[in-house]
Amino acid sequence: MKYDFDKVINRIGTGSIKFDFVNERGKPCDILPMWVADMDFPAPAKVLEDMKQAVAHGIFGYTEPMADYFDAVSGWFQTRFGYTVERNEIVLTPGIVYALAQMVLAYTKAGDSVMIQTPVYYPFYDIIRDNDRQVVKNPLIYQEGNYTIDFDDFENKIKSENVKLFILCNPHNPVGRVFTKAELMRISEISKRYGVIIAADEIHCDFVYPEYEHVTFGKINEDSIICTAPSKTFNLAGLQVSNIFIKNENLRQKLKRQINKSGYSQLNTLGLVACRSAYKNGAEWLDQLKEYLYGNISFTKAFLNERLPKVKLIPPQGTYLLWLDFSEYNLPQKQLDRLIVHKAKLWLDSGVMFGEDGHGFQRINIACPRKTLEIALLKLEKSLVNADEQQ
């Protein structure tokens, strides 16, 4: 490989929430963090070079992106996904969660219902409940190690709960599904029938593995809202920039007005530089990164099959977040969490963070050097010896 993803970089002392806030978040000081979804790899060299040039200029005034920024963004999605988006159809926000929260306010009123597919990325719950809306759950069906959509429940809940907005997560975090075109078309058809607005969080769209294809929901339904960001793809989360694609003029203006109400205007200057550079220059880096991550997935699968067969890896179709099923150990969730944290000394995400249907699961971030991953799996194996012996 041209790029060295095996290099272990010390992130302690950088203000990283993943590494530097262990005690503040109630974890042992000697824990190995494998939780929050950022990567332990530096951004592409060209992105860093372009940021250094911007820093060298020395002036960080109010900044708006110029034509080359929009060309880079639209060019990426046209090349990678065959999706065409025009400059005026892109709404800039500091992050997708922020954008979704503003959509909840823009497209619904207090007391309205917003649907999500659980278990799902936990901030979705917060942006709905904290804005005085009702969470409606359409639980994914878990059967024989796979997740599918319960379309009967999906339609029935839309009708019975008078759902106004549906937040789609695709690729799905944490279960790793990449929904098929047929599934997306059925979601669109049902939603259109009942006038439900769809906001598709596609932040992990660049991490889809062999045999699977990401179909952006914008190609299925032009009136949907597509949420994208370079943050996961190029490890730029701290630079706070996302690009929201909205072709529907009415929906776009409603969101813009709501963002204005929140008092937000220009984005982070260096975030705009990094986003433009990444989408313009980062393709080769990303392709090699995906190859490396797929190797990490294969390594994890082989390790579990050989040494921890009772831990079931849900086959990931996308994302760099693996969803592990510990249910064969028959441990209460709190006991499982304590074992992971205090015996394995691993900081993973407890499955119940994503909803009650995450009971018995843990989410692990494998976007790290393979040596780090190996250490984590060995720690997990050691901690589960006693649990196995007690069965």
Image (cartoon, helix red, strand yellow):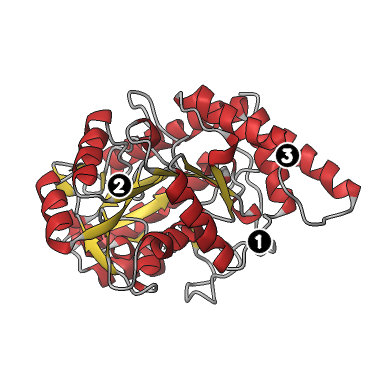
With 122 as the anchor, is 325 left or right in this view? left
Q: Earlier in the sequence, mark 1 or mark 2?
A: 1
Residue assigned mark 2: 175
Q: Position of residue 146 (x, y in %)?
A: 20, 41
The residue under the point 19% across, 49% down is 194
With 28 as the anchor, is 355 left or right in this view? left
Please say if 361 is above or below 170.
Answer: below
Q: Secondary structure at mark 3?
A: loop
Could you tell me the amino acid type at mark 3?
Met
Query: Nearer the observer, disc 1 or disc 2?
Result: 2
The residue under the point 89% across, 52% down is 58
Q: Position of residue 25 (x, y in %)?
A: 49, 74
Could you tell me the amino acid type at mark 1?
Ile
Q: Earlier in the sequence, mark 3 or mark 1?
A: 1
The residue under the point 24% across, 33% down is 185
Classed neighbour count for the residue bearing mark 1: other residues with Cα under 10 Å, few (<14), some (14–19), many (≥20): few
Q: Give 75 or 299, whichever is nearer the viewer.
A: 75
With 47 as the anchor, is 285 left or right in this view? left
Q: Which mark is residue 12?
A: 1
Classed neighbour count for the residue bearing mark 3: other residues with Cα under 10 Å, few (<14), some (14–19), many (≥20): few
Query: Nearer the observer, disc 3 or disc 1?
Result: 3
Q: Earlier in the sequence, mark 2 or mark 3?
A: 3
Residue assigned mark 3: 66
Q: Position of residue 318 (x, y in %)?
A: 38, 37
Q: Give 203 or 296, whichever is nearer the viewer.
A: 203
Q: Give 329 or 320, whichever is nearer the viewer.
A: 320
What is the CA distance from the residue labelled 1 to the residue labelled 2? 29 Å
Could you tell me the amino acid type at mark 2?
Val
Quarter-of-image position of residue 145: top left
Classed neighbour count for the residue bearing mark 2: other residues with Cα under 10 Å, few (<14), some (14–19), many (≥20): many
The residue under the point 88% across, 54% down is 59
